[in-house]
Amino acid sequence: MKLKTLVKEEKIEIRKEDIITFEKGLYGFESIKKYAIIHNENNPFNWLHSLDQEVCFVILDPRHVDENYDFEIDEETLSFLGADETSEFLLFCIVVIPDEIKNMTINLKSPIIINRKNNKAIQLILDEEQYLVKHKIVSEIMKGT
Amino acid sequence: MLVVTRKLGESILIGDDIEIIIVEQQNGKIKIGIEAPKNIKILRKEILEAVKSENINASMKKENIKLDNLQDILRNNSKKE
């Protein structure tokens, strides 16, 4: 299908195997189930773009911000995604970009995981207390430099 | 909404599998114990609300964002560390 996006001039070709399904949607967007990831050459930032509505998010693999980012995926989630311990996942968190882009934050508390085999995805809310909903990507010390 | 008054140590049962126990009460804070099957999600409400609100925030004003600019910022940030 050809997708008209909010982020590129020309329509983008989306193949069936590119379609990511969030059976539960994203928090706050529960009715939107189908998305595609729009890549940008070698840029670690990508767009997660809805296929049925004009909604899109900037996403980033959190390990670019915290290389030790790690959490447990429970049985129920594995089962929901049709996965097991051997499955491979894509991992992303949603980035919020304010007017002053240096102040951008990433939601480490609520990652998105995608089962690479079947493109089933879910947004989790982690128990781990050290991960914040608004984690500053640029640390305060750096900003002052 | 069902409102129930409990004393310390007393419980409430929800369905066949969920038990809520009043464990401790001190300084206006109440410690609540929850027994529930693993497949039931248990969350502090304000966290769920914060995540929803953050997602909504994130979905706004996309027209002016250039991913290249974001990449530059990320690169500069890691260089300095």
Image (cartoon, rainbow, N blue to C red):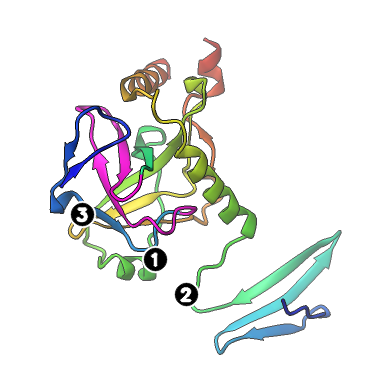
Q: How many marks?
A: 3
Q: Residue at x 35, y 47 (%)?
A: A53
Residue ID for mark 1 = A74
Q: Secondary structure at mark 1?
A: loop
Q: Amino acid at mark 3?
A: Arg
The Cα–Cα distance between marks 2 and 1, rounded to whole angstroms, is 9 Å
Residue B10 place in picture, x, y as percent: 77, 83
Residue lying furthest right: B27
The answer to if A30 sits in the magenta stretch is: yes
Residue ID for mark 3 = A116
Image position of B28 with respect to B55: above or below: below
Residue ID for mark 2 = B38
Q: Amino acid at mark 1?
A: Asp
Q: Which residues are magenta?
A: A27-53
The answer to if A76 sits in the magenta stretch is: no
**Chain under label 2?**
B
Residue lying furthest top: A145
Label disc, if present, on residue A4 of the rendered structure: none
Image position of A11 with respect to A120: above or below: above
The Cα–Cα distance between marks 3 and 1, rounded to whole angstroms, is 17 Å
Cβ atoms at labels 2 and 1 below 8 Å apart: yes
**Chain under label 3?**
A
Residue B46 place in picture, x, y as percent: 64, 54
